[in-house]
Amino acid sequence: QVWRVARNGPAGRGSRRQWHVVLAAASADQMPAAEQIGQRHSGGRILLQWFAVLTKPRAEALGHAHLERQGFECRLPRVRRERRSAAGMRDSIEPLFPRCLFLRADPAQHELARVRSTRGICGLVRFGAEPARVPVAVIEALAARSDADGLVRLDPPSMRPGDRVRIDTGPLAGLPAIFQARVAADRVLLLVGLLGGQSSIEVPARHLALCC
């Protein structure tokens, strides 16, 4: 299932016009909207719902902290990625969805208008005039993929021998390659063009992305 959150307006530095959340969840016809979007009490009225929140550039943690200080329940999914620095490659903890976090509230009980005036926050993501409601299955799937440190584990893309891939992380970032084989649970063998010839190299599977 693909759940998409789109926003209007110009994209600022470091932002994206839309986020795609791809999860191994039930298909849309297996997910009744009311049950999946909120939680009901015995009277049948939805009390709590999850909403998508747009933050200012590089202000996800700031917005998350200030929303929690106001009493909102929030989720900021994060992942561990390798980044190049002056000292070499290092691990970096980053938001899974740049400029996006999730907030749980009861619209009938919480004044959602104050979300927009929170430090680090631009406002709720909306479809027209309606706030974007996030299915509970999305939040639960993210929680199920989180480790003991609260970081989301991302599965490497499914690849077959001969598939064209791109190295996204590490010293060879940006280099196109051809997938040859998986040599371990988290490592793969690639064929790459280097110095006018072709060489086989071994890299972590999490460093790859499939070429379109």
Image: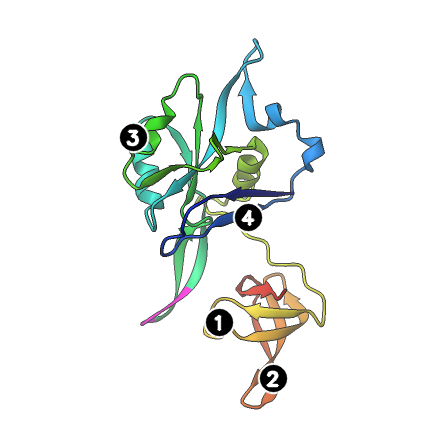
Residue in the picture at 27% in, 38% down: 119
Residue in the picture at 46% in, 70% down: 170
Whichever of labels 2 and 3 marks the residue nearer the N terminus, that label is 3
Whichever of labels 4 and 2 marks the residue nearer the N terminus, that label is 4
Whichever of labels 3 and 1 marks the residue nearer the N terminus, that label is 3
Q: In x, y percent, where is residue 106?
A: 44, 21
- Mark 2 element type: strand
Instruction: Please state which of the two labelled residues, at mark 2 or mark 3, is closer to the viewer.
Output: 3
Q: Which residue is mark 4?
A: 20
Mark 1 and mark 3 in contact (Cβ < 8 Å)? no
Query: In the rendered image of this protein, does residue 180 appear above or below residue 19?
Result: below
Q: In the shown orientation, is residue 144 left or right of residue 178?
A: left
Residue 85 drawn in magenta: yes
Whichever of labels 3 and 4 marks the residue nearer the N terminus, that label is 4
Label 2 amino acid? Ser
Q: Residues within 10 Å of mark 1 (few under 14, many from 20)?
A: some
Looking at the rendering, the stretch of residues picked out in magenta corresponds to 83-87
- Quote the CA–CA distance across marks 4 and 2: 34 Å
Q: In the shown orientation, is residue 199 left or right of residue 66?
A: right
Q: In x, y percent, where is residue 102?
A: 44, 36
Query: In the rendered image of this protein, does residue 72 appear above or below residue 27?
Result: above
Q: Which residue is mark 2?
A: 199
Of 171 and 107, which appears nearest the observer?
107
Q: Which residue is mark 3?
A: 69
- Mark 3 element type: helix
Whichever of labels 1 and 4 marks the residue nearer the N terminus, that label is 4
> In which quadrant will I find the C terminus?
bottom right
Give the image quarter of residue 150: top left
Q: In x, y percent, where is residue 159?
A: 68, 63
Query: In the rendered image of this protein, does residue 66 appear above or below residue 208?
Result: above
Label 4 amino acid? His
Of 180 and 66, which appears nearest the observer?
66
